[in-house]
Image: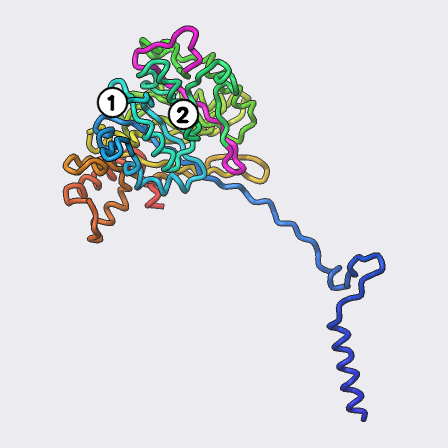
Amino acid sequence: MKRTAALLFTLLLLLTACAPAARPADGTASVTATDAAIPETTAAPQPIVRHLLAAGDIMSHMPQVQDAYVAETDSYDYTHMFADAAPLIGAADYAVGNLETVLGGGPTYSGYPNFSSPDALAEAARDAGFDLLATANNHTRDQGMDGIFRTLDVLDRLGLKHVGTYRTKQERSENHGAVVADLNGIRIAFLCYTYGLNGYSLPEDRKFAVNIFNIDYTTTLVDFDYELVSADMAAARALNADLIAVIMHWGVEYTNTPTSYQKETAEYLVEQGADIILGGHPHVLEPYETLTVTDVDGNEKNGFVIYSMGNFISNQQYDPTTKTTLLLDLELTKTPEGDTSVTDVSYTPFYMLHRDDLPAGQRRRLVNIHNAIAAYENGEDTPVTAALYERLKTALDHCHSVMGAEGDKNNK
């Protein structure tokens, strides 16, 4: 009997322990001693890390126009030229490139010296993953003022941001021409300038249409417009963006080293607040570095500059210099305190294939150099021939000699 009573008592205790706690009359849940002993914890703020991808000159010489032509539909398609680069571009938090042509509207198109390209070029750039295109360069006025304005209309229709050219004074005066992009928590103010317009000039009442950093842009190209640029940079600083990026069309074509004018200009831009400077125009690669200067507030400031990213999409024939290009990847980090900087720099080398013996739609194509070399060495089914394999290795060596092998993402 004692044993049975003990068992019944133990069972009663277990049932009571498993029963829900009684709710107080006011409807609030009761708090047990165990609950009260659990301290509340708050996760520590984490840095925000984003990636800005940048590419060089997006052009369309006539062999490219012909390669993009689709006879069956009497239309144009540049998708294949971007295909190998698209996965990297699309994976970035934000991607920018230099549209070094005019979207003239056809029905006839032209290459150098006065470019007019199908709208499909910009469509392919957007579909590859580009978010913003720079539109101030030496070919901006190739199709007159109407070409400038139509290009912007097309980019707007495609949902592509643009910087460097403007349709109205009001458009230029808003933020002094700067475009602000939000990379999910890191805000970048973009500005863009060109050294000139290949001898063309802007009408006096339309000086607002193109950002030009030289006062003497139709002649000697050495008189920097400090008044214009300093006012723009002051306005960019006032936007309180985390970073300021300036896209510059400058330098001497086909030279792999920056000029003293480029270096002096870069230092001035960093002094004025630039954190990132993305250079183009030489059509070949020029190196990158981090500058340390005293800024307008008297503080020590760092600024990253790449003097030229070379061509990206083009038909220029110099091998390997104008066919070798890259995708630049800038890691941006914003600390919980709000300080934002470039915390890592890397690049992926690319090479522009020219294969005139193939049908349209296959002749011009960017290839990832490392992937193409590996495919050939592994005996995969690849368009890389023995001769092209040697050219790819030469192109990779050239890229490393200019940019430094340590920045190659394949080596990190």
Residue closest to the eye, 41 or 165: 165
Residue, x 21% and y 29% (percent of image)?
Answer: 63
Residue, x 26% and y 42% (percent of image)?
Answer: 369
Of the residues shown, which amino acid type is indicated by label 1?
A: Gly
Residue closest to the eye, 265 or 253: 253
Q: In x, y percent, where is residue 161? A: 44, 28
Residue, x 45% and y 23% (percent of image)?
Answer: 191
Task: Locate the N terminus and report the quarter of the image it occupies.
Answer: bottom right
Q: In x, y percent, where is residue 246? A: 43, 25
The magenta span reads 182-209
Examine the structure image and report whether residue 352 is included in the region drawn in magenta: no
* Residue under numbered circle 2: 247
**Please, what secondary structure does the residue beneath circle 1 have?**
loop
Q: Extreme bottom residue here?
A: 1
Question: In the image, is 407 to the left or to the right of 44?
Answer: left
Q: In x, y percent, where is residue 205? A: 43, 7
* Residue under numbered circle 1: 111
